[in-house]
């Protein structure tokens, strides 16, 4: 089998640092998502079953209007956010895994105490933004696919079934290592229609019969 391609970075280190600096500044607003949460949020939007207008998701990411220094800074920051989302779409379209901005290990900590929990919480924020679209086609399948993100996010700790899902540290660690693959699975589920099998040639009906032979 061919060697698996390494996960694709969605922004380079310098761009991530610039975005991190702005989101961590007071000008982004105290309720704005941080870099880790924003990354998860935008990857969810890349996977989402239908497009969410930038005018909607930008407001949700910042929970208000940031105090940009000028139009140039506004264009630069929003451009980086849009590129992160667009690069996630491009990678997933090619069957590549997105690189996540943290090590894929909990090191014995609870998920909500790590960047992994923050990222999954940001991802779920992206889901909540258009929740009906994620669940309208097949609610059971959607819930199954999203369960690892929900469990690791820490947003559903009050639900006994969710806590049981990652009760054992080994179970939580297994899900963490699978996060990039789970993102691709979600993308394929929502964005790539199943292949329609080519029709088989129809057998010829014997002469004198009014009905077609239903067997190929």
Image (cartoon, rainbow, N blue to C red):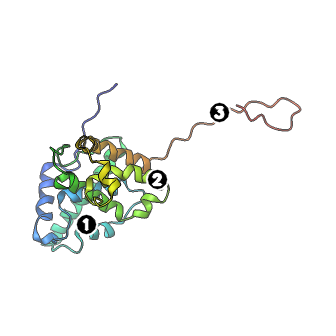
Residue displayed at 31% across by 59% down: 124
Question: Residue 170's x, y, as percent?
Answer: 24, 40
**Is the Cβ of the residue at disc 3 closer than 8 Å to that at disc 1?**
no
Pick the residue in front: 92 or 126: 126
Q: In this view, does 136 lie to the left or right of 7?
A: right
Q: As displayed, is residue 158 above or below residue 3?
A: below
**Marks 3 and 2 close (CB-CB < 8 Å):** no
Instruction: State the SS at label 3.
Output: loop
**Image quadrant occupied by the N terminus:** top left
Dot 3: within a 10 Å radius of its alpha carbon, few (fewer than 14), some, or many (20 or more) residues? few
Residue for point 17% across, 44% down: 103
Find disc 1 in the rendering and name its residue: 61
Task: Left or right? Give the position of 31 relative to 136.
Answer: left
Percent across and percent down for residue 13 are: 13, 49
Residue 160 position in % (x across, y down): 33, 56
Mark 3 → mark 2, Cα distance in angstroms: 32 Å
Query: Is 184 above or below relative to 199?
Result: below
- Which disc number belongs to residue 200? 3
């Amino acid at each position: 089998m061919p060697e698996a391609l390494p996960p694709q970075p969605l922004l380079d280190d310098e761009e991530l640092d610039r975005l991190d600096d702005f989101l961590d500044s007071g000008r982004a607003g105290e309720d704005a998502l941080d870099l880790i949460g924003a990354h998860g949020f935008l990857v969810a939007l890349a996977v989402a079953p239908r497009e969410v207008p930038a005018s909607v998701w930008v407001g949700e990411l910042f929970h208000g209007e940031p105090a940009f220094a000028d139009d140039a800074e506004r264009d630069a920051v929003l451009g980086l956010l849009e590129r992160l989302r667009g690069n996630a779409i491009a990678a997933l379209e090619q069957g590549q895994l997105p690189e996540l901005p943290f090590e894929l290990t909990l090191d014995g900590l609870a998920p909500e105490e790590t960047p992994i929990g923050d990222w999954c919480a940001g991802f779920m924020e992206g889901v909540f933004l258009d929740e009906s679209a994620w669940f309208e086609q097949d609610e059971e399948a959607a819930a199954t696919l999203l369960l690892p993100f929900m469990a690791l996010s820490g947003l559903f700790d009050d639900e006994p079934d969710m806590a049981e899902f990652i009760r054992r540290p080994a179970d939580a660690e297994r899900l963490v290592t699978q996060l990039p693959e789970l993102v691709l699975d979600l993308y394929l589920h929502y964005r790539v229609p199943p292949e329609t099998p080519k029709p088989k040639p129809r057998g010829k009906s014997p002469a004198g019969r009014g009905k077609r032979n239903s067997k190929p």
